[in-house]
Image: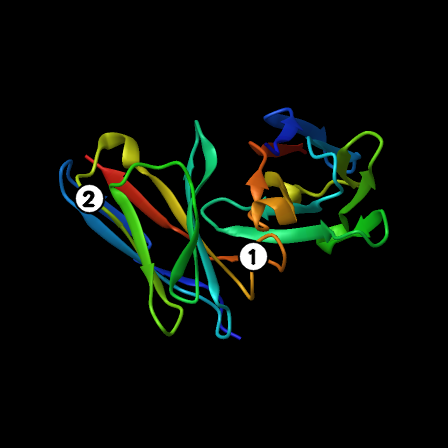
Amino acid sequence: KAGVTQTPRYLIKTRGQQVTLSCSPISGHRSVSWYQQTPGQGLQFLFEYFSETQRNKGNFPGRFSGRQFSNSRSEMNVSTLELGDSALYLCASSLVSPGGTEAFFGQGTRLTVV
Amino acid sequence: AQSVTQLGSHVSVSEGALVLLRCNYSSSVPPYLFWYVQYPNQGLQLLLKYTSAATLVKGINGFEAEFKKSETSFHLTKPSAHMSDAAEYFCAVSEVDSNYQLIWGAGTKLIIKP
């Protein structure tokens, strides 16, 4: 079966712009989680969506938002980009929950803010 | 709050030597425990998980981990390292109190010397 697909793989944006990243989970999976990965901070949890509802949220500013559609595909949006937002953004899909059933990760979107 | 500690941001071993990556968690309640591996420019892949069955868990690629409640540890081992094992390894924990969200360690980069 197809894995988790994240698009685009690479993105370069300018400070102050906004960006939208997309994640298509494995068919049948209803949970989608988003993480930010940087060399200094490691893996930081952004939020989790389950059946179109945000179920959990990490400690990120309101510039970071997300949503999930009825087909479980998810998007995350970052507004007013800052240099510090440069990171690898990872999406993970799970049947029910990332820590209860296995989390399957996409390859990530590498965002560079200049 | 639950936390995960991985001892050593970098571990270097010779090819053919024993691999030991350490992970300690803080929960007093036996949680679910995971090891994930991340190869360069890739997402994370599940190596193995403990969910309160056998305390010695076997995973993919010859890795295994032992849950020790008394030591609140879940160390990852492999008897003989291969060059292909070079990657970053993440320990994670989840429990029902956190709605089965994954709490991540900082990661350990495994370096294999020829």
Q: Amino acid at mark 2?
A: Ser
Q: How far across and down, in percent of the image, does residue B73 sit?
A: 76, 33
Depth order, front residue of B78/A54: A54
Question: From this viewpoint, is residue B79 visible?
Answer: no
SS state under label 1: loop
Q: CA distance from mark 2 to mark 1?
A: 27 Å
Marked residue chain, label 2: A
Task: Report which residue position mark 1 lands on.
Answer: A103
Q: How far across and down, in percent of the image, does residue B56 sit?
A: 85, 47
Residue under the image location 43 percent in, 67 percent down: A51
Please identify the quarter of the rendering in which residue B93 is found.
top right
Depth order, front residue of A46/B87: A46
Relative height, residue A68 to residue B102 (above, below): below
Judge the density around disc 1: few (<14), some (14-19), many (≥20) Cα neighbours within 10 Å.
Answer: many
Relative height, residue B92 to residue A98 (above, below): above
In what quadrant of the picture does the N terminus of chain B appear? Answer: top right
Relative height, residue A76 to residue B30 (above, below): below
Task: Report which residue position mark 2 lands on.
Answer: A79
Lateral position of residue A77 relative to residue B88, left or right: left
Residue under the image location 38 percent in, 43 percent down: A88
Please identify the quarter of the rendering in which residue B107 is found.
top right
Marked residue chain, label 1: A
| Residue that extends furthest to the top in the rendered view of this protein | B8
Residue under the image location 59 percent in, 26 percent down: B9
Lateral position of residue A1 relative to residue A53, left or right: right
